[in-house]
């Protein structure tokens, strides 16, 4: 039995595997600067967040139709199912696709069709979260958010992603207020490359329900105390942190210290096609590095479920499955 988990930090566009990128490029007549698998793979050496984002945004050009979005969503869910994922809260970047002339309705229809297929085939429940680029003006985010709300597009929440340094959460205060007023869930990347102060801003000004990454909170003891007291979820992505050099090695990853501090951390995959593995590989990396006991693994799984936007009965059912997984050890 696989440990049942909720995947709460996963960018759909980050599940585009190199083979899929090249196949879709051929299918949709897109010229990529790296036409062979070998040349494409040679680009996957990142020095920081921005060096990854440059490749990530360039590769998205191959996504053109609702069918493309449906296909990659279904492919991701198939792989997630094999990792023990029972519930997913999927991020996508509307600005990336609007910029290329795609219609929001088409993008969302494709993703939703994939999510529905995942529910029917593997019983994976879902939420969909539109992430806004912090490197783009807040006016752009606001305009798209108004359209999403007014045209009643099927999203459950908003997030904030892309280049962090130099783009503090305060820039997006109005966008997040509007989202909350319209009943949307709110999350934000903060404290990945940016300072602990950005986490404080995300909490105080954006009033987020979860912090994505948040690993730099450890630099501010008062903030750690507050995050523990509020049991604010932090969605940690270990392979991403190492590949983007926010930590030098897995041995230096702060996960163990975060758990010991009593922070509500859970493990996720961020952009698995870029960082060397899906949720199971991220869990395996930290289990191996920090010799996590089965009880500690169950804590991470329960945290993921409790930090999700599922209703309470669904959370209770999944947590009971975690308990069953833990008990199975003694059979
Ligand atoms: N978009 C996709 N992955 C991201 C990450 N790790 N940080 C910020 N923006 C992202
Ligand atoms: Zn992310």
Image (cartoon, rainbow, N blue to C red):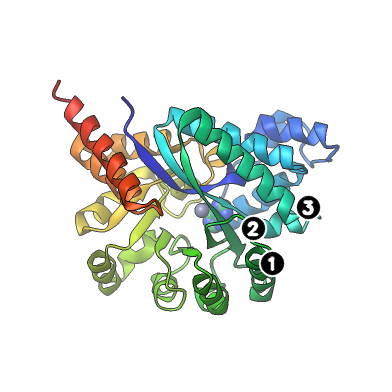
Splitting the image into 4 quarters, where does residue 93 fall?
bottom right
Instruction: Confirm or reject: label 2 Cβ below 8 Å from ligand 1.
Output: no
In terms of secondary structure, where does tag 3 sit?
Answer: loop
- Dot 1 or dot 3, earlier in sequence: 3
In terms of secondary structure, where does tag 2 sit?
Answer: loop
What residue is rendered at 62% in x and 34% in y?
Answer: 17
**Within the displayed image, which quadrant is ligand 1 positioned in?**
bottom right
In terms of secondary structure, where does tag 1 sit?
Answer: helix
Which residue is labeled 1 in the image?
Answer: 147
- Please name whichever residue, 248 or 175, is drawn nearer the observer in this view of the structure: 175
Mark 3 and mark 2 in contact (Cβ < 8 Å)?
Answer: no
Residue 131: percent from left, percent from top:
58, 59
Q: Please indicate whether residue 65 sits to the left or right of residue 229 in the image.
A: right
The furthest residue to the left: 330
Q: What is the number of the mark on residue 225?
A: none
Q: What is the number of the mark on residue 102?
A: 3
What residue is rendered at 52% in x and 28% in y?
Answer: 121
Mark 1 and mark 2 in contact (Cβ < 8 Å)?
Answer: yes
Q: Is residue 320 above or below residue 183?
A: above
Report the Cα–Cα distance between label 2 and label 3.
15 Å
Q: How many marks?
A: 3
Q: Is residue 52 above or below residue 318?
A: below
Q: What is the number of the mark on residue 153?
A: 2
């Amino acid at each position: 039995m696989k440990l049942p988990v909720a995947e709460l930090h996963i960018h759909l566009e980050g599940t585009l595997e190199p083979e899929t990128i090249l196949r879709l490029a051929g299918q949709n007549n897109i010229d990529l600067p790296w036409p062979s698998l070998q040349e494409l793979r040679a680009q996957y050496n990142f020095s920081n967040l921005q060096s990854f984002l440059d490749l990530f945004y360039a590769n998205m050009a191959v996504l053109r139709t609702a069918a493309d979005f449906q296909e990659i969503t279904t492919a991701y869910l198939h792989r997630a199912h094999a990792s023990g994922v029972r519930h997913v809260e999927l991020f996508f970047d509307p600005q990336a696709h609007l910029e290329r002339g795609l219609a929001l309705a088409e993008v969302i229809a494709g993703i939703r069709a994939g999510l529905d297929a995942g529910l029917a085939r593997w019983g994976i429940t879902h939420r969909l979260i539109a992430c806004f680029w912090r490197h783009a003006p807040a006016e752009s985010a606001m305009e798209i958010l108004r359209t999403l709300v007014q045209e009643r597009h099927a999203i459950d929440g908003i997030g904030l992603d892309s280049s962090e340094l130099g783009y503090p959460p305060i820039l997006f205060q109005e966008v997040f207020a509007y989202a909350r007023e319209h009943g949307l869930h709110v999350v934000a990347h903060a404290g990945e490359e940016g300072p602990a102060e950005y986490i404080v801003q995300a909490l105080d000004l954006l009033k987020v329900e979860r912090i994505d990454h948040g690993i730099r909170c450890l630099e501010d003891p008062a903030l750690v105390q507050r995050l523990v007291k509020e049991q604010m979820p932090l969605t940690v992505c270990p392979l991403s942190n190492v590949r983007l050099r926010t930590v030098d090695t897995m041995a230096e990853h702060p996960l163990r210290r975060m758990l010991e501090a009593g922070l509500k951390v859970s493990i996720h995959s961020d952009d698995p096609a870029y960082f060397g593995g899906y949720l199971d590989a991220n869990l395996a990396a930290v289990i191996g590095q920090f010799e996590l006991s089965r009880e500690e693994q169950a804590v991470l799984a329960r945290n993921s479920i409790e930090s999700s936007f599922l209703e309470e009965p669904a959370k209770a059912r999944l947590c009971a499955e975690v308990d069953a997984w833990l008990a199975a050890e003694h059979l």
